[in-house]
Every structure is written in structure tokens, then in C-alpha cells.
Amino acid sequence: MSKVILNEDREMSQYFTDTRPEAEAVLIKLMRQTPPWRKLQMVVQLNHTMHTLQMSGLRQRHPQASEKELRRRMADLLLGPELALKVYGVLEPTGEPPAKAEFEHAN
């Protein structure tokens, strides 16, 4: 999403470069009319979806891992390896060879 900038005619630039301005205007209008509780509900749903996708990816990369190990690996993704180590201790794999390529936590 690009930054919203008002030009000299006080028109908004586009948020989404792949969306027609008319459609974007409707979306923005609807979001402005959305009550705060609904916006929060949408964020919660997005967080749940991301958690589900991350766990699915971890299960694919570590099919032999226990739920405990998967939760610990999730902590690496969410907190970064250093903080996850401090909070949860050493990651103890459950009888599987290490994955060839782990995603690094981006700061």
C-alpha cells in the first residue's frame, strides 16, 4: 500500500496501484463508515488467518514435529530467534533432520 498524498488540487492519490480509482473510492468510503468494533474484528480475523497459514507452513517444513515444537518454531517467527530463545529456551527438534532453508525473521 502506498502513502496517501494530497496533491495541489486536494485530491487523494491512490492507496492501491492495482485498483481503479472509482473502486478504491468506494472501498475507502465503506471503510470510513465501518464502525470501530467491526474494524477490530477484521484485524482479529486477519491475525487468525496469518497464524493458520504460518502453522501450515511450519507443518509442511517439519512434518515430524510435535505441536510443542511447532509452537516454539512459531515463536521464532513472531519474536525472532534471539527473543524466542530467551523467553522459551532452546528449540528441541523431535527426531527430524533440520529443514534445508528456514525463513529468517525480518526486523
Image (spheres, rainbow, N blue to C red):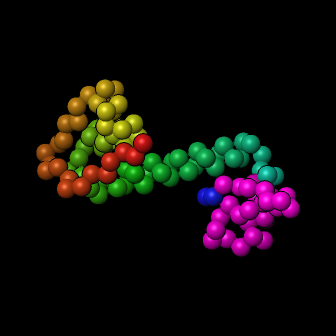
Residue at horizontal 51 percent and vertical 48 percent from the top: 48
> How many dots with numbers?
0
Viewer-proximal residue among 16 and 89: 16
Please state if 19 lies on the left or on the right of 28 as rendered.
Answer: left
Residue range corresponding to the magenta coloring:
3-31
- The location of residue 86, given as percent across then percent down, is 31, 26
Residue at horizontal 75 percent and vertical 70 percent from the top: 21
Residue at horizontal 57 percent and vertical 49 percent from the top: 45
Q: In which quarter of the image is the N terminus?
A: bottom right
- The location of residue 91, given as percent across then percent down, is 23, 36
Q: In which quarter of the image is the C terminus?
A: top left
Residue furthest to the front: 8
Whether residue 14 is visible: yes
- The location of residue 25, given as percent across then percent down, is 78, 64
In this view, 14 is above or below 81: below
- The location of residue 43, given as percent across then percent down, is 61, 47
Q: Which of the 4 image quadrants contains residue 63? A: bottom left
Whether residue 30 is visible: no
Please state if 103 lies on the left or on the right of 63 as rendered.
Answer: right
Dominant SS of magenta comes to: loop
Please state if 45 lies on the left or on the right of 12 as rendered.
Answer: left
Q: Is residue 74 magenta?
A: no
Residue at horizontal 74 percent and vertical 42 percent from the top: 36
Q: Does the magenta stretch include residue 8?
A: yes
